[in-house]
Image (cartoon, helix red, strand yellow):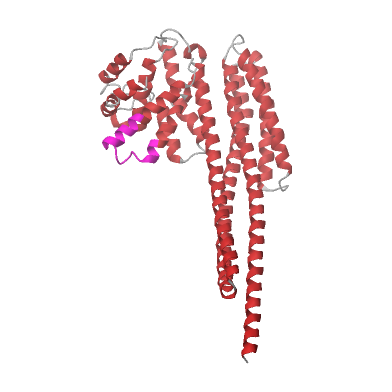
Amino acid sequence: MKKSLSISALIVTFIAELAGIIGIIFLQYSLDHQSTLFNSMIEDVFEAESDVEQIRSLLYKYEYNMSIVLNSSESTQAETLKELTQTELELRQQLFVHGQLMKNMQPGSEKELLFRSVNDDILKYLNFNVVLLSMKEFESQEDMAKFFDNNILPLMNSVNYSIDILSKITKAYIENSKAEMAAYIHNSQLFSILGFIVIVIAIIISIIYSYRVLKDLEQKNKFFKSKSESSEMRISEIQYNTIMGIADLVESRSGETGQHVKRTSHLVNMILMQAKKKGRWSDVLTDNFIDCVTRAAPMHDLGKIVIPDAILNKPGKLTPEEFEIMKTHAAAGGKIVKDIIGGIENKEYVDIASDIANYHHEKWNGKGYPTGKKGSEIPLCARIMAVADVFDALIAERCYKKPMSYEDAFALIEREAGEHFDPEVVELFLELKDEIYAER
């Protein structure tokens, strides 16, 4: 009887152990297979996302150079025309890569149709721009504007719409994949725990094996989570670098090297941090607000892209008519900001960036432009930007003036408190005087 029980127990133990081992092996195989499949699909998604972001970046560069060529005389456009040709070549090369990616997609799928739409619209867009350039010599500005509105603008809108939809599809796919992988790992962990319990009853070595599998599951979970987060950060970095590149290009038109946007962004951040330290505007000054304002500050003068070179780089004082044209860059900047980042960034960041570009030339006494806002009607971000922008402009050498000393610049800012600038912002700025001197 005892021998029979011992044999029965041995058989039960063997079966339990065998079932546990088979279960663990199957679990390991399923996890590896799912990991390989998930990794392959994610790589394809990021490759496609990188492609459309590269196209978006090249389009911004091409549109910028195109605007310079159209607004410059024949004697000054040669170098920009060369850059425009080079950008067009890069764009066509990227479209070849774009076409290769499209071959691997399911024909007739939403993504394949969007990819094809981007490809076809950009080719038409490039061809229409060639026609527009040829019109510059023979046609009137009115005819060129009409041709642009009827032929080129719809294509630009179509391309931007398709790229925005592709970006949203990619992000939704990543989120769904992360959720599916989390559910899969969760179910796998439950199965592993059951196997673990069975093997504990059977033999100690199976417990060790189960423990190793659980650790492997945990590491793979961390790997997929890290990979998804790092890729999302990479996409955001590409978008931010594109925006910074455009800001640098705009500044370079007026003889700046891009340092103005970096310095003013730094000054804005210093004022914000000082305000937070002092407990000012505590209901507004969240960490996210500070980050958004700091990152948006470099875009404050994007509207200068619409100002002719003759006015932007004039060495002397502007005439009243020229100054009126120069003033249009503020409102134009607010619109350009929304056009550029409206579909790729969150609403708070877009609103802050637009407010900075639109209102950083408003004055506390209501005598600024473009709308004549006064006092607290002016958004806080724009009031802070105004102080940083004017101070840096005062101490910098420009085509129309010599640099002012730091002492005189600080004195001017202080005198204009309550007139040009928000007195509270000026007070915070002057408290940073020693720190700003130290960074000279």
Instruction: Specify the farthest residue to the top.
Output: 316
**Would you say residue 154 is visible in this rendering?**
no
User: Can you give x and y, in whole percent of width and height, for residue 76 in the image?
Assistant: 59, 11
Q: Visible in this render: residue 185?
A: yes
Q: Nearer the viewer, residue 6 or 326?
A: 6
> What percent of the width, then of the height, locates residue 331?
44, 26
Question: Which secondary structure dominates the residues rendered in magenta?
Answer: helix
Find the magenta span and give its range. Answer: 270-290
Judge left or right: residue 51 versus residue 333.
right
- Residue 216: image quadrant is bottom right
Q: Is residue 315 above or below residue 238?
A: above
Q: Residue at x 50, y 36 (%)?
A: 342
Q: Is residue 282 magenta?
A: yes
Residue 360 versus residue 210 in the image, above or below: above
User: Relative to 308, does residue 429 appear above or below in the rendering?
Assistant: below
Which residue is at 66% across, 29% downward? 125
